[in-house]
Amino acid sequence: MAEILIGTCSWSSSGLRGPFYPTKINPRDMIAFYAQHFRLVEVDSTYYHMPSRQSFKSWAARTPGDFVFDVKAYKELTKHDRKLEPSADTFHAFADALAPMHEAGKLGVVLFQFPPWFRFAEENLEYILECKELMQPYRIAVEFRHGNWLQRDAEQRTVRFLRENGLTYVSVDEPQFPGSTVPPIAVATSDIAVVRFHGRNRDTWFKRDISVEERFNYLYTEQELAEWVPKIEELANNTRQVHLLMNNCYHDFAVRNARDISRLLGEPMQFGLFQ
């Protein structure tokens, strides 16, 4: 049975002050506090801004030896700007920034979350391989944002492609719009499996001009999370490590649902946080 790591996407949401962090905690101390209770976190800020080596060096120094960071790829690298073709220089700059985390043995996967317009096509399969090559020696995880990667004949081709190239498929839980969003399929394509829980808020999923926290304003019920227990157990039977990440970052929802999924899976509560 694989090791199961549970955490949240980011650790500095404003709604965590009070319910999780001490109200007056210094932002610099948040990652150390967080790491007393979880062994996994996803760094989301790297999608919006090119990170610095110093940031990763500092975070690595402030966390225990067995702590794991998954890191979201910079948006230029995932073609979120349709007018800007990703450059090798940007790939190299991003990879260089991650080096201190990798050297500390705390880098999990680098998450390439592609936009909805990045659909199943030969040229996009080739681009994913370019990403893998340019990000060596880091582990790459791939999250699709359009369901056609897993529709009809494309599903078998997608899964086979990821397995043959040692790439991690990111399973997702998100609002379901048939023909558009990605279905909640759990698939192991490498020795690490990743599941990201985005919430199921249909009203905000495609809404523009709202904050990230508003978009993911959704608190899972235990029954909804329980749907994933057999899927996660199956992933654990076919991998060496499973990463479960709560991205419903409104208020303290992600932390609360991390507690819930831990209990449902029979995972020990870390450091007595939720006693």
Image: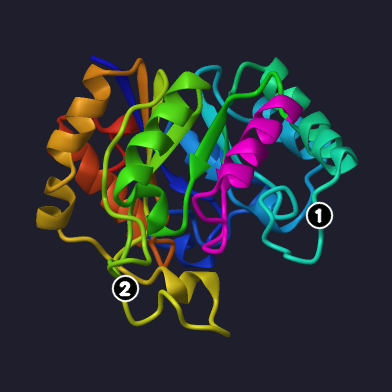
Amino acid at pointer 2: Asn
Q: Secondary structure at mark 1?
A: loop
- Report the disc number at residue 85: 1
Please state the horizontal and vertical placement of residue 226, each as a whole percent of the image. Answer: 12, 47
In this view, the residue farthest toward the left is: 223
Amino acid at pointer 1: Glu
Question: Is residue 31 shown left or right of residue 81?
Answer: left
Neighbour tally class for label 1: few under 14, some 14-19, many 20 plus, Cα within 10 Å: few
Give the quadrant of residue 138. top right
Q: According to the image, label 2 marks what residue? A: 201
Looking at the image, which residue is at 35% across and 15% down?
Answer: 240
Question: Is residue 75 shown left or right of residue 19?
Answer: right
Up-down: is 24 above or below 265? Answer: below
Quadrant placement of the N terminus: top left
Q: CA distance from mark 1 to mark 2?
A: 32 Å
Q: Are the residues tagged 1 and 2 within 8 Å (C-beta)?
A: no
Give the quadrant of residue 256. bottom left
In this view, the residue farthest toward the right is: 89
Up-down: is 159 above or below 24? Answer: above
Looking at the image, which residue is at 13% across and 54% down?
Answer: 222
Q: Is residue 275 visible?
A: no
Q: Is residue 127 a member of the stretch shown in magenta?
A: yes
Q: Which residues are magenta?
A: 112-134
Looking at the image, which residue is at 41% across and 74% down?
Answer: 205
- Report the disc number at residue 228: none
Please state the horizontal and vertical placement of residue 152, each as a whole percent of the image. Answer: 29, 49
Q: Secondary structure at mark 2?
A: loop
Please state the horizontal and vertical placement of residue 108, each as a whole percent of the image. Answer: 54, 27
Q: Is residue 139 a member of the stretch shown in magenta?
A: no
Indicate which label's residue lies in the foreground, 1 or 2: 1
- Closer to the N terminus: mark 1 or mark 2? 1
